[in-house]
Image (cartoon, grey):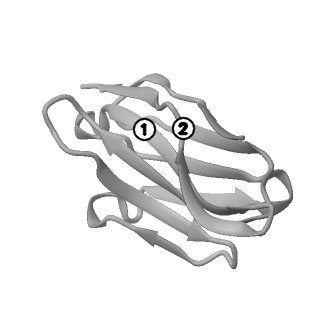
Amino acid sequence: QVQLVESGGGLVQAGGSLRLSCVASGSISRIRAMAWYRQDPGNQREWVATVTIGGITDYVESVKGRFTISRDNAKNTAYLKMNSLKPEDTAIYFCSADLFRLGVGPYVYWGQGIQVTVSA
C-alpha cells in the first residue's frame, strides 16, 4: 500500500507565500517523478509542476517565476513553494507520484488534496 499525504495549505492574502509538502509512504522502490496539480470548483484538474528523480523541473506557464517545486528523494517528499500568490491560485492542490512498488510498475498515486485559498 502507498499513501501520499499533503500538508501546508491554508488561507493567505494575495502576495503572500505558502509551502506545500507531500510525503509518500509504503512499499516504494523508486519514485520517478512527483507532481502537483490543482482543481477549483467547476474546472478540470490542472497540472502545476513536476520534479523528476534527477531534479528536472517543469511548470505550467501561469506559475513560472512564482512557484518552486523540489523534492527530497531520501524522504520520498516533494515540496511546492508558492510565492506572490494570487486569488486565481485558489484551489485544492493534489500531489501525485509516479513510482515503482517492490520493483513493479510504474504506478501513479494521488494524495487526497489540500485547500489553498488566496484572499484579495
Which one is nearer the viewer's eye here, 103 or 14?
103
Front residue of 120/19: it is 19
- Which SS class for mark 1? strand
Q: Nearer the viewer, mark 2 or mark 1?
A: 2
Count of numbered tags: 2
Residue 111: give its label: 2
**Looking at the figure, which quarter contains the C terminus?**
top left
The image shows residue 79, relative to residue 57, as above or below, that is: above
The image shows residue 97, relative to residue 30, as above or below, that is: above
Instruction: State whether residue 32 appears in this view.
Output: no
Question: On the image, numbered disc 1 is attached to which residue?
Answer: 93
Q: Amino acid at mark 2?
A: Gly
Residue farthest to the front, as pictured: 104
Q: Which quadrant of the view contains residue 8?
A: top right
Residue at 57% over, 60% down: 107
- Asked if residue 99 can be seen in this view, the reply is yes
Label 2, label 1: how far apart the Cα atoms are: 9 Å
Q: Nearer the viewer, residue 97 or 56?
A: 97
Residue 61 image point, x, y percent:
28, 67
Whole-percent x, y for residue 81 in the image: 55, 48
Q: Residue furthest left?
A: 42
Q: Nearer the viewer, residue 9 or 118?
A: 9
Which quadrant does the N terminus fall into? top right
